[in-house]
Amino acid sequence: MPDWLSFGFYNRLALQHLGDVVMVLTAAIVTLADRHLYPRIARRIRRLHATLRFVGFLLVVGIGYGILTLFTARILRHGLSWQSGRYVVLIALGICALLAWEAQRQRRV
């Protein structure tokens, strides 16, 4: 049986590119979470002066989304490395399926 037909081949390939896999999944998660986060942020800073709203928005976007991205990437990296990366392909495909379902529900596809 050729090596590229085995499940282990794809696990080794995904583990070699784990940083890229985590980056793509993190970007998709943060993009889809934006729909739920932005209205809450806008509601909180709506009553402020325009200058304070602008500064608040910059802080939330610059710092808040940065922190959200870092924590999401860290959680994904540990989750995908579970069981020494034995199930990295299955977990990544499952996360992709959930993200596709959520994107379809939000009508972003």
Image: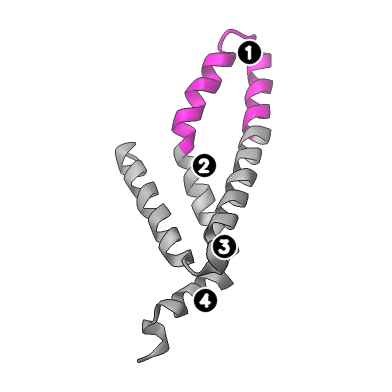
Q: Which label number is shown at residue 12?
A: 4
Give the residue number, with chain letter if any, for mark 1: 50
In the picture provided, is 45 more to the left or to the right than 29? right
Mark 3, Cα crowd under 10 Å, few <14 / some 14-19 / many 20+, is some
CA–CA distance between discs 3 and 4? Answer: 12 Å
Mark 2 touches mark 4? (CB < 8 Å): no
Q: Is residue 17 above or below residue 9?
A: above
Dot 1 or dot 2, earlier in sequence? 2
Q: Residue at x 52, y 76 (%)?
A: 12
CA–CA distance between discs 1 and 2? Answer: 26 Å
| 35 drawn magenta | yes
CA–CA distance between discs 4 and 1? Answer: 52 Å
Dot 3 or dot 4, earlier in sequence? 4
Q: Is residue 109 visible?
A: no
The local secondary structure at tag 4 comes to helix
Mark 4, Cα crowd under 10 Å, few <14 / some 14-19 / many 20+, is some
Give the residue number, with chain letter if any, for mark 3: 81
Residue range of the region highlighted in magenta in the rendering: 33-61
Mark 3 touches mark 2? (CB < 8 Å): no
Residue type at the position of mark 2: Val
The local secondary structure at tag 3 comes to loop
Magenta segment's dominant SS is helix
Dot 3 or dot 2, earlier in sequence? 2
The local secondary structure at tag 1 comes to helix
Q: Which label number is shown at residue 88?
A: none
Q: Is residue 56 visible?
A: yes
CA–CA distance between discs 3 and 1? Answer: 45 Å
Q: Nearer the viewer, residue 92 or 17?
A: 92
Residue type at the position of mark 4: Arg
Give the residue number, with chain letter if any, for mark 2: 30
Q: Residue at x 48, y 65 (%)?
A: 88
